[in-house]
Image (tube, helix red, strand yellow):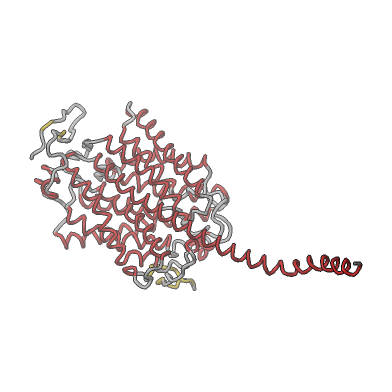
Amino acid sequence: MKRSSLVALLLAALCPLGLAAQAPAGSDSLATAANVAAAANTVAVNFVWTLVCGFLVMFMQAGFAMVETGFTRAKNAAHTFAMNFMVYGLAMMGYWVCGFAIQAGGLGPMATLGGFDKLNTEYVVTIGGKAWGLFGHTGFFLTGVAYAAPVFTYFLFQMVFMDTTATIPTGAMAERWRFSAFCVFTVFIGAIIYPLYANWVWGGGWLAQLGTHAGLGHGHIDFAGSSVVHLTGGVIAFVGAKLLGPRRGKYNPDGTPNAIPGHNIPMALFGTFILCFGWFGFNSGSTLAGSDLRIGVIATNTMLAGAAGSITAMLFMWTKFGKPDPSMLANGALAGLVAITAPCAFVTAPSAVLIGGVAGVLVCWAVFFVERNLMVDDPVGAISVHGFNGAWGILATGLLADGTYGDGWNGVSGAPRGLFYGDGGQFVAGCVGILANVVAVGALTYVCYKITALLVGGHRVSAEAEELGLDLPEMGALAYPDTPEVSSAVLLSESAAISYKASAA
């Protein structure tokens, strides 16, 4: 009995030792399996997040179509809407053929999407012993990366951003642009103009390297596209509208402008609501990671800036002209959203309100400056909303980034800080990026515009077609065939009456 009790005690003492000896191996195995599963789930969440946000940005195309059509005349409604519809397919084809390869062919590892690293070929020039990226050259026609889910996901997300850029000029050049010229020029935007600058900022190109190679902060920082998307679109719109010339009746012989009212302000305001909704995908989705909890900050900053822009634009117009002006309410909100797009992840909520508030005033001033001083006819205010406020968004990043997010951005240790938080180099990098955009995008736009003119025989519709409205001459269909519409005749003076007539069948 004593012997059996002794044996039992001995076994009881040895059992925990045996279990303890096995525990590390077993728990390591379980922990490893759990970590692998967690990592796989994180990547899956990031995939879904990026795709869903891309879908939201794609739906913004409907918002742009409604805004631009509402701000133009009824006799051109089908033409304006058709441009916004076809820009999606045309620009996408150009982007698929070579645009994506130029932009992202040298991107490097896609950390949030599983670490795929086959987009790794960037054309560089060596200056001062350092290699500066100019453009990528992997992924033409999405070949060489067949069925690589990270690449296809990134392509979709970046394609809808490019599409936003491509649709901005359709508003500034509306009501006098030949549809055939629009088609060819839009392909150039998707294939060459947008991708090149996007590579410099988002594809590892030379603007992103200003931090590591030149000590300018973290290089040119644009979280979601104030410069890559909006300033690019604004510069294209400015050059295109300037070359195309103003609409008939826009300017008097002495150079003073006449008002040419849009035909459907509620449509434009509804389109603005769609854009505000889609912008949550635009900015928050640029994390490329649903697992990045900063998305909550980004979304809220986006919302605050848009609201602030609408309020300050309303107050500016109300104070200056005695009426709030619904069209400026819409453009004020959009200006705030454009401006917050670059700094949305790097600034506090009060800074977001400040950025949006400044944008709301800036867009009102810019609309009159572009129209009266630069003598450029922009029916929807696209140059002011996207161009001026895209630049302001970059400057705001260089001023107000507070160093709480983005550790290691563009290969520079630490998080980005703006001038007001101790890093003046970040502000300089932003200024360099703006200047590079104006020069490079402006020059490319000019060249592509001239080539398009040679290919299709010119950009401008005939005077007769413009007077009649572009729906029938260009599209063969009226937007409003059975409804009497305001002809939207030019308001030659404040007291001029608007003439009414039925649309031709």
Q: Is residue 230 visible?
A: no
Q: Nearer the viewer, residue 27 or 328?
A: 27
Q: Nearer the viewer, residue 268 or 329?
A: 268
Q: Residue at x 46, y 42 (%)?
A: 355
Q: Residue at x 40, y 44 (%)?
A: 337
Q: Say which quadrant the C terminus sits in.
A: top left
The correct choice, above or below, for 24 with respect to 76 in the image is below
64 vs 246, left or right, is right
Q: Is residue 252 visible?
A: yes
Percent from the top left, x then y, of residue 123? 40, 72
Residue at the limit of the structure toward the front, as seen here: 1
Residue at the limit of the structure toward the right, as seen here: 2
113 vs 190, left or right, is right
Q: Nearer the viewer, residue 293 or 47?
A: 47
Percent from the top left, x then y, of residue 364? 35, 38
The correct choice, above or below, for 11 with respect to 377 in the image is below
How many numbered marks are there? 0
Q: Say which quadrant the N terminus sits in.
A: bottom right
Percent from the top left, x then y, of residue 330? 34, 38
Percent from the top left, x then y, of residue 93? 27, 62
306 vs 183, left or right, is right
